[in-house]
């Protein structure tokens, strides 16, 4: 009989692990026919975390010996935010009865160049009268 494990995602940026709020987190798995099954779409809170989400995992007794099925289920994770590069994870392991915390380091997108030097004055052309 399948059991469940819990997944929490924590999105952050920089070595100081500053939390990223407002990131969209999508948890899915690949079905046998190749299509994706989406289990959860959440948004990170002010601490960069999601609410715990229960996911199906195999019965832990089935994976106790050599040659038996893996004692975990595989899931995919996508984390996106308009100010950061997309982060994707495949084969994220969820074990029965275990709370898994997946840390997601987000890399900021480069800031667009304004093309000008802010130290130079802006010259306003005269308006035709």
Image: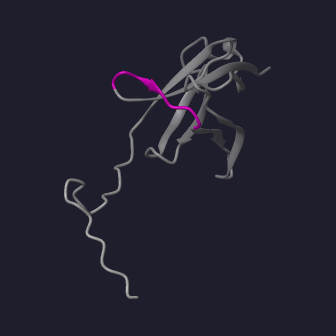
Residue 38 picture location, percent across and down: 70, 43
Range shown magenta: 15-22
Tell me which residue sits at (31%, 60%) in the image. Answer: 114
Q: Is residue 24 above or below residue 21?
A: below
Tell me which residue sits at (55%, 26%) in the image. Answer: 48
Q: Is residue 47 magenta-colored?
A: no
Q: Is residue 43 above or below residue 47?
A: below
Tell me which residue sits at (67%, 13%) in the image. Answer: 60
Question: In this view of the protein, can residue 39 be seen by the observer?
Answer: yes
Q: Residue furthest bottom?
A: 129
Question: In this view of the protein, can residue 69 be seen by the observer?
Answer: no
Q: Residue furthest front?
A: 129
Quarter of the image containing the C terminus?
bottom left
Residue 115 picture location, percent across and down: 26, 63
Res. 55 image quadrant: top right
Tell me which residue sits at (62%, 14%) in the image. Answer: 99
Residue 78 vs residue 42, the one in the foreground: 42
Residue 127 vs residue 51, the one in the foreground: 127
Q: Is residue 48 above or below residue 83?
A: above
Residue 14 picture location, percent across and down: 36, 29
Predominant secondary structure in magenta? Answer: loop
29 with respect to 119 (left or right): right
């Amino acid at each position: 009989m399948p059991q469940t494990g819990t997944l929490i995602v924590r999105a952050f940026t920089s070595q100081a692990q500053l939390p990223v709020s407002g990131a969209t987190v999508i948890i899915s798995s690949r079905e046998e026919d190749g299509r994706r099954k989406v289990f959860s779409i959440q948004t990170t809170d002010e601490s960069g975390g999601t609410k715990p989400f229960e996911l199906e995992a195999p019965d832990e007794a089935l994976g106790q010996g050599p040659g038996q099925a893996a004692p975990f289920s595989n899931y995919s994770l996508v984390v996106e935010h308009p100010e950061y590069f997309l982060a994707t994870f495949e084969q994220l392991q969820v074990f029965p009865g275990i709370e898994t915390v997946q840390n997601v380091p987000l890399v900021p997108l480069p800031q667009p160049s304004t093309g000008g030097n802010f130290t130079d004055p802006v010259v306003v052309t005269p308006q035709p009268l």
